[in-house]
Amino acid sequence: MTFRIGSGYDVHALVHDVSRKLILGGVTVPFDKVLRGHSDADVLVHSVCDAILGAAGLGDIGRHFPDSDPLYKDISSLILLKRCANILNEAGYAIENIDTTVFAQAPKLEPYKDEMSHKIASTIEISPESVNVKATTTEGLGFEGRGEGIAAHAVVLIRKISKKSG
Ligand SMILES: Nc1ccn([C@@H]2O[C@H](COP(=O)(O)O)[C@@H](O)[C@H]2O)c(=O)n1
Ligand SMILES: C[C@@]1(CO)OP(=O)(O)OP(=O)(O)OC[C@H]1O
């Protein structure tokens, strides 16, 4: 069996904006700040998208969904994730498992991690046991520690399911 691995990393700034909500892993997390972005700025889902595309050698999220395109303004990143999974399947691969880490000094994500795993898993139609969401502070250090932004990292293992068509 052929396996390939991919990694994704993304950062978005935390800002005050009452017109938006903080969305992480497709889940609305109550907090006094939100992530700035062209889409809903779901940094966790973006890292998963990049890891999926990277595993298949198919570029990155910005190549497929440019932030200059008004089509993606305020779009739910779960829609982009679904499209990445479809691109992957069309290339003849399936996702084996996903492991992620969110770097956030606050808010505390423990109450939301399982819901995030389930949201990501159901979007790409894999088992929730195949999607792990972890979180860490950076002990007050760096931009995450100062609460200026949130970063996320994802690793995805994919397996070949068929020969690439075309
Ligand atoms: N935003 C966060 C950050 C951390 N956690 C949980 O706390 C544990 C300890 O964090 P450290 O930064 O001291 O490693 C971590 O393992 C997470 O379980 C969290 O839920 N949300
Ligand atoms: C998600 C996209 C979609 O326009 O925009 P942003 O929400 O700004 O996110 P980023 O990770 O900066 O860039 C990727 C873009 O594809």
Image: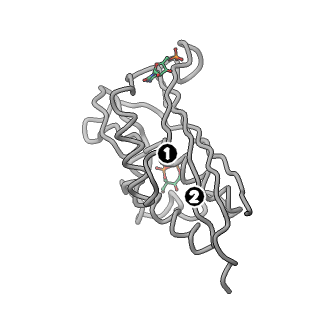
Residue at screen point 30% across, 39% down? 28
x 33%, y 28%: residue = 111
- Residue pointed to by mark 2: 95
Q: Which percent across, then down, holds residue 153?
A: 59, 38
For image coordinates 40% across by 34% down, the residue present is: 113
Closer to us: 151 or 4: 4
Secondary structure beneath dot 1 equals: strand
x and y, in percent, of residue 140 in the image: 53, 13
Q: CA distance from mark 2 to mark 1?
A: 10 Å
Residue 108 is left or right of residue 93, and the answer is left
The numbered disc on residue 131 is 1
Tag 2 secondary structure: strand
64 or 121, which lies in front? Answer: 121
Residue 21: x and y, percent? Answer: 30, 39
Q: Position of residue 18 (x, y in %)?
A: 25, 35
Looking at the image, do the residues carrying marks 2 and 1 touch, with CB atoms under 8 Å apart? no
Q: Can you say whether 157 is above or below 101 in the image?
A: below
